[in-house]
């Protein structure tokens, strides 16, 4: 089976241009690229579904029909693209309102993590693993006093006495 | 059986209410559940001991053949009795243990009762997966109970340690259970034990299961979580961390031992870790000052003992092991409850501060002596008879299990462990009740209720010791599964002058000597610890956790740079490289043909040029217009291919989104932000080109790879017969693949809501059209478009308004026609909805936002919601009528002189789709059109409307 080379050229160019735009920083460009990429991919469905033919409407023609299933899928994709475009435009507008431009910035939290990794700062949850003794009652003293070797009762009983 | 398990969970759900009504007395009520279960279990348990195993099967997930299998084998019966019996007593004890003022009781009571239910479920389950679920339930509930008081950092740490360690083991176990179930071809435990599979896979699976068992039962190297778990209230320690949960590992070993004790690695693993744990726990217990912690290390030691004996896999050891399980449950929970009473009466658990309690708490002392004697293995208690049997079993271990010289070595370990047990028992008893030269603590006499549970449990230790024969016959029901060994085991007080008795005497004697010389012993221990620097398991574990933490932050820092283009680029490169390699290797055989006609070539040339220019354009508006060109070009290609529905929708969507883009662009700066032609941009272009080529290649390959005829071509028949229409694409959308479409319109609703909330920053979208209601007071009825008065006169166009006035009703009618016609001709809900959306758009463009509100005086949310509801109802109603969801009904309704109306019920779904698309359009126009207008006017960027409309 052979494939229509012209459609493939259209796919290559649409996807390439769309991808290039999606990789940009400006949200408007990303959206333009997204829509273009979508058009290219929709054409992929068309090419993969076989040769051109008559519309998949029963009784419209005696020619062989095109495959209706990919068409239904692409139809869904087209409408979803509309929804996503509208949402993206609202985001772009909002970004412009807040920051004066619609560029997608690097994530601030990720940057913090990177900086902590560079400084070798893991989380503090497992610092001073020996501090304090477990007990069913009482609570940590706000200013932990220096521990005397192993005498857990220093911490274990006093708050409890207070609790009574 | 499922009833009593369920009853526990029901009770747990009701517990908070009970606590609110009855306060602490709620525990008495809750204790009735395990108590009743215990009494109910007595008869089936006896039947199990007589050899009649009761099973129960409840269908759970029939589609993947998963059932809730429960069984009451002798082992299960024993464990179930322990779990419910001790559970009832502990809940009863809680009534007096907690303070009136404790505000967390509602949670605690529920969690503890739920735990009792999970534990019961665990020990009666007969299915690998049911077992696993209850297993992990106990882990999670134990986490909650250890963290009962989260105010202390040490408690939180202890709870997390327990959770992480036991869940790690649980996951290893889960893999093991899957493999085991696969190898055995069944997930029923009784079947697996009866016909055990063999082979390397089975060996690995069993080892993984044992990792789970060892972590749950706190054996070396997982032992450190159990002493930390003493952060839990003492009743919890008595129940979970002595009698029930930590026994789960022992239970699992005991269950598998008859089938798998001969596989390579079983005995070395269990006996060695068991005995090492026993000795290590004993040594650590000798150094504790907190009597609860002393008991915790004692428990670690005893669990090692139990696993070593139960895992030995001989008949004698099995009998002894089960006896020990029972004995340990009785004496250890007694001792924990005793500690709880001491804690409540004196306010301390430090054995250096306690003195003279044997005088002030005589009843408690009696119970403690009985339980301690059982722990140390002193006649006539159950601990003695069981330990005697264990010693006898290990004397014959070399012969029974074919271990050769390793048998006596294991025996030595056992005797050393028992000696240490005697020593720390003496330390406990003397420490808690003895007399020493300190100020005696203030003792408040405990309530009778608080003493009841430990006294009952201690008495049972005694009864168990005296009724050895009755126990033997019952426990043999389990132990009899194993081949008989050199001697027929029994639990009895007097075997005669056997070597086992000699070893018992040796252990007790040496243990007491160790205790008498305790100062020197502890000094020596201290020196050894100082000299050797053995890393403490908990510190090693924390080091490990810190290392993982560190690794994760390094990996995150290196890979998560936070730049979307970089992430996308990586994803796209993977898309190019990984399938691309396959693409190149399977390239030959791809056939190409030329264009179908010259028109196609022309369209593609236009599309290509427009696409390239879009990338190069620096003006926003130009980029958007060029995008439109590619979109319409694509629509033409759809037409040429024979897809009229696609082409129609594509044209409508393209028009709508073009206008939407422009509506937003008018506020954004006209040019994109500056971007120098740097290497970064070259990389972008390169990635884009590579992706384009790769996708094109995949398209070619996919089109050529077809070997079967497309499934879609078979849709024609069903579309006509069941869908009742001729347009197969539309019927695919509203009938054949209706679930997809339903999901899609739900996404549209979400997107529309998102757009509105981003612009109005309000959840109440109704504001926008309420504004118009106020303005309608000043309505100008003589104008072509009544709402257009809000636009400054200079920006109004009379011609546009007239055209709009004329065209709007036509467009609306056409949209409704398209929706109805879609079943047989191109069209349908999407196309119809989009036409209606465009009609509204024209109204908005001609007359501004007030005009839009006049055209559609409803809230967009209402339109979206009713569309979704109608679509959903069209699915639900057939289901309610006994058909499949979304099944179409075809009716030919006679309509007198007009013939008959052909009605297909999927039309209602299409109406829902239509409404959702109209709602989306309305939301987009109100937000990105009217909303942005208003914000512009408020900022003074756009000329506002005249305040008084004076058109004559």
Image (tube, coloured by chain):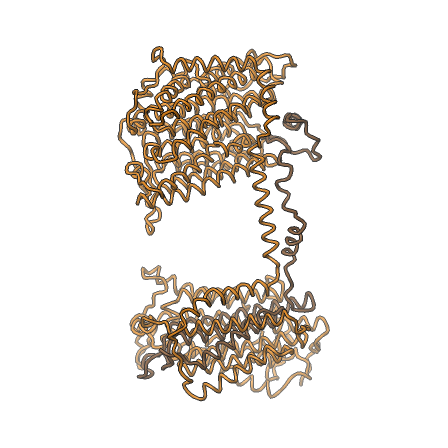
Chain colours: A brown, B orange
- Determine whether B885 is above or below B297 in the image: below
Q: How many marks?
A: 0
Residue at screen point 47% across, 29% down: B239
Q: Nearer the viewer, residue B384 or B738?
A: B384
* x and y percentages locating residue B584 in the rendered image: 44, 70
* x and y percentages locating residue B48 in the rendered image: 29, 29
Residue furthest to the front in view is B405
- Determine whether B678 is above or below B452 in the image: below
Residue furthest to the right in view is B940
Q: Nearer the viewer, residue A136 or B906?
A: A136
- Determine whether B465 is above or below B839 in the image: above
Whether residue B892 is visible, yes or no, is no
Quadrant location of the C terminus of chain B in the rendered image: bottom right
* x and y percentages locating residue B930 in the rendered image: 62, 73
* x and y percentages locating residue B831 in the rendered image: 46, 76
Residue B777 falls in which quadrant of the image?
A: bottom right
Quadrant location of the N terminus of chain B in the rendered image: top left
Residue at screen point 36% across, 41% down: B128
| Direction from residue B720 to residue B910 in the image, left or right | right
Whether residue B241 is visible, yes or no, is yes
Residue B245 falls in which quadrant of the image?
A: top left
Q: Nearer the viewer, residue B507 or B816?
A: B507
């Amino acid at each position: 089976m052979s494939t229509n080379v012209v459609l493939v050229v259209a796919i290559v160019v649409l996807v390439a241009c769309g991808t290039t735009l999606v990789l940009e920083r400006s949200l408007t460009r990303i959206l333009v690229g997204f829509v273009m990429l979508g058009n290219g991919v929709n054409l992929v469905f068309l090419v993969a579904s076989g040769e051109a033919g008559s519309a998949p409407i029963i009784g419209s023609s005696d020619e062989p029909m095109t495959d209706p299933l990919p068409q239904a899928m692409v139809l869904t994709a087209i409408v979803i693209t509309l929804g996503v475009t509208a949402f993206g435009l609202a985001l772009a507008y909002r970004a412009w309102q807040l920051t004066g431009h619609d560029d997608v910035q690097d994530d601030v939290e990720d940057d913090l993590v990177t900086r902590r990794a560079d400084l070798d700062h893991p989380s503090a949850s497992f610092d001073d693993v020996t501090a304090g003794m477990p007990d069913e009652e009482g609570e940590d003293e706000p200013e932990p006093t220096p521990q005397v070797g192993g005498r857990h009762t220093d911490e274990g009983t006093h708050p409890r006495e207070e609790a009574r | 059986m499922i009833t009593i398990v369920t009853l526990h969970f029901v009770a747990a759900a009701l517990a908070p209410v009970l606590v609110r009504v009855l306060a602490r007395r709620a525990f008495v009520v809750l204790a009735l559940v395990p108590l009743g279960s215990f009494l109910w279990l007595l008869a089936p348990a006896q039947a199990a001991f007589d050899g009649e195993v009761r099973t129960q099967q409840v269908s759970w997930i029939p589609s993947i053949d998963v059932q809730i299998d429960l069984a009451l084998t002798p082992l299960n019966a024993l464990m179930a009795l322990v779990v419910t019996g001790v559970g009832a007593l502990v809940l009863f004890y809680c009534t007096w243990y907690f303070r009136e003022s404790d505000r967390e009781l509602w949670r605690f009571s529920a969690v503890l009762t739920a735990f009792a239910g999970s534990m019961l479920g665990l020990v009666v389950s007969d299915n690998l997966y049911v077992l696993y679920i209850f297993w992990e339930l106990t882990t999670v509930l134990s986490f909650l109970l250890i963290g009962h008081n989260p105010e202390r950092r040490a408690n939180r740490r202890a709870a997390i340690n327990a959770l992480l360690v036991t869940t790690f083991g649980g996951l290893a176990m889960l893999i093991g259970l899957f493999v085991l179930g696969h190898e055995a071809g069944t997930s029923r435990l009784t079947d697996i034990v009866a016909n055990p599979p063999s082979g390397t896979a089975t060996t690995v699976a069993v080892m993984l299961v044992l990792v789970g068992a060892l972590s749950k039962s706190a054996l070396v190297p997982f032992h450190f979580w159990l002493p930390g778990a003493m952060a839990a209230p003492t009743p919890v320690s008595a129940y979970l961390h002595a009698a029930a949960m930590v026994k789960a590992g022992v239970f699992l070993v005991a269950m598998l031992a008859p089938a798998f004790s001969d596989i390579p690695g079983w005995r070395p693993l269990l006996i060695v870790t068991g005995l090492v744990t026993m000795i290590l726990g004993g040594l650590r217990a000798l150094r504790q000052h907190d009597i609860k912690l002393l008991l915790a290390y004692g428990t670690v030691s005893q669990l090692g003992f139990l696993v070593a004996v139960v895992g030995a896999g001989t008949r004698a050891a099995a009998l002894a092991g089960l006896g020990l399980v029972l004995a340990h449950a009785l004496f250890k929970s007694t001792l924990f409850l005793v500690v709880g009473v001491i804690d409540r009466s004196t306010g301390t658990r430090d054995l250096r501060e306690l003195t003279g309690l044997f005088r002030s708490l005589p009843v408690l002392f009696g119970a403690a002596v009985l339980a301690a004697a059982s722990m140390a293995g002193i006649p006539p208690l159950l601990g003695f008879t069981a330990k005697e049997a264990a010693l006898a079993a290990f004397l014959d271990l070399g012969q029974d299990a074919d271990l050769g010289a390793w048998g006596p070595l294991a025996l030595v370990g056992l005797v050393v462990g028992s000696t240490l047990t005697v020593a720390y028992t003496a330390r406990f008893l003397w420490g808690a009740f003895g007399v020493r030269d300190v100020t005696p603590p203030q003792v408040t006499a405990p309530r009778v209720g608080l003493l009841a549970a430990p006294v009952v449990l201690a008495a049972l230790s005694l009864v168990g010791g005296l009724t050895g024969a009755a126990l033997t016959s019952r426990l043999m029901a389990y132990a009899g599964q194993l081949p008989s060994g050199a001697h027929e085991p029994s639990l009895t007080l007097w075997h005669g002058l056997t070597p086992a008795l000699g070893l018992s005497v040796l252990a007790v004697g040496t243990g007491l000597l160790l205790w008498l010389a305790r100062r020197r012993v502890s000094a020596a221990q201290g020196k050894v610890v100082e000299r050797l620097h053995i890393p403490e398991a908990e510190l090693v574990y924390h080091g490990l956790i810190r290392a993982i933490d560190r690794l994760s932050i390094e990996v995150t820092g290196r890979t998560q740079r936070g730049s979307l283009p970089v992430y996308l680029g990586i994803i796209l490169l993977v898309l190019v490289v990984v399938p691309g390699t396959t693409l190149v290797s399977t390239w030959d055989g791809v056939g190409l043909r030329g264009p179908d006609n010259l028109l196609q070539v022309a369209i593609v040339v236009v599309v290509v040029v427009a696409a390239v220019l879009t990338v190069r354009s620096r003006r926003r508006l130009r980029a958007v217009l060029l995008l439109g060109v590619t979109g319409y070009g694509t629509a033409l290609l759809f037409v040429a291919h024979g897809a009229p529905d696609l082409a129609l929708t594509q044209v409508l969507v393209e028009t709508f989104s073009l206008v939407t883009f422009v509506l937003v662009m008018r506020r954004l700066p006209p040019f994109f932000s500056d971007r120098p032609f740097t290497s970064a941009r070259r990389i972008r272009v390169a990635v884009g080109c590579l992706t384009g080529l790769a996708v094109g290649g995949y398209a070619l390959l996919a089109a050529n790879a077809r070997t079967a005829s497309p499934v879609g071509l078979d849709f024609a028949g069903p579309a006509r017969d069941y869908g009742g229409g001729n347009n197969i694409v539309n019927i695919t959308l509203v009938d054949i693949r209706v679930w997809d479409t339903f999901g899609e319109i739900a996404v549209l609703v979400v997107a529309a809501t998102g757009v509105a909330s981003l612009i109005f920053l309000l959840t109440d979208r109704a504001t926008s059209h309420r504004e118009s209601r106020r303005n309608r007071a000043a309505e100008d009825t003589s104008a072509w478009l009544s709402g257009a008065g809000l636009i400054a006169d200079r920006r109004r166009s009379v011609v546009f308004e007239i055209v709009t006035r004329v065209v709007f009703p036509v467009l609306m009618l056409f949209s409704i026609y398209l929706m109805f016609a879609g079943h047989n001709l191109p069209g349908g809900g999407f196309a119809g909805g989009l036409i209606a959306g465009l009609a509204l758009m024209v109204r908005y463009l001609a007359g501004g936002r007030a005009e839009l509100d006049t055209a559609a005086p409803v809230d967009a949310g209402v339109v979206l919601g009713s569309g979704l509801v109608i679509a959903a109802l069209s699915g639900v109603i057939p289901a309610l009528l006994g058909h499949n969801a979304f099944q179409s009904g075809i009716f030919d309704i006679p309509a007198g002189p007009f013939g008959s109306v052909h009605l297909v019920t999927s039309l209602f779904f299409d109406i829902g789709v239509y409404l959702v698309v109209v709602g989306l359009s309305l939301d987009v126009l109100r937000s990105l059109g009217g909303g942005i207008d208003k914000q512009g006017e408020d900022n003074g960027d756009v000329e506002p409307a005249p305040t008084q409309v004076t058109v004559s």
